[in-house]
Image (cartoon, helix red, strand yellow):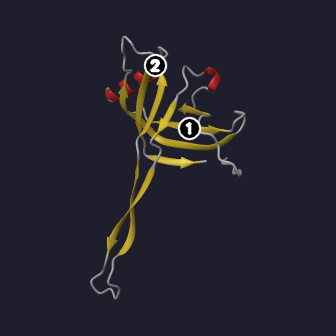
Amino acid sequence: MAEFRARPYAQFNFLVEIDGGADAADAKAGFQEVSGLSMEITAAEYRAGNSKENSPMKITTLHKLGDVTLKRGVMGALDLYTWIDAVRNGKQDQLKTVTISLQDESHEKVAMKWILKEARPVRYTGPTMSGNGSEVAVEELVLAFERLELA
């Protein structure tokens, strides 16, 4: 699905779907920010005692995935809280697929997708509130996941 072009895509046209959730028109609230998409492959050093080389070789080992943070304005929807509450209460069927789609400027084509497999919420943060503040109230959900795929 990824489509190459000479100019990079802007970062502000994206959709987040949780378990194939509704499209943008039906969403309870869109996310204003997605951060932390990362994957790291670790390598171990190994040198056999009889090696003629005086340096170790690198052996690929495990990979690590960073936690992804989703932020959105508070809209009175309880869907994120309901999800983390179910995980907190021990429900084992709460692993979901989260798809983050970067769109082109016209919102007609998907430039690239990041698919988080077996995602679960690990932290919810409510908004900071101030009597003299003028910012939008923002809630935050941090997801841990087991596999990252790009399409």
* Location of residue 56 (image quadrant): bottom left
Q: Is residue 92 left or right of residue 20?
A: left
* Location of residue 46 (image quadrant): bottom left
Residue 29 at x, y = what percent?
Answer: 54, 21
- Amino acid type at image mark 2: Glu
Q: Vertically, is 104 above or below 74?
A: below
Residue 141 at x, y = what percent?
Answer: 41, 30
Residue 3 at x, y = what percent?
Answer: 69, 49
Secondary structure of the residue carrying tag 1 is: strand
* Tag 2 residue: 135
Q: Decide which of 130, 85 is in the foreground and name it.
A: 130
Nearest to the eye among marks 2 and 1: give it. Answer: 2
Badge 1 density bin: few <14, some 14–19, many ≥20, Cα 10 Å: some
| Earlier residue among tags 2 and 1 | 1
Q: Decide which of 25, 21 is in the foreground and name it.
A: 25
Q: Is residue 71 left or right of residue 10?
A: left
Q: Decide which of 105, 145 is in the foreground and name it.
A: 105
Residue at 36 percent of width and 15 percent of height: 130
* Tag 1 residue: 100
Q: Vertically, is 60 above or below 102?
A: below
Residue at 63 percent of width and 26 percent of height: 24
Secondary structure of the residue carrying tag 2 is: loop
- Amino acid type at image mark 1: Ile
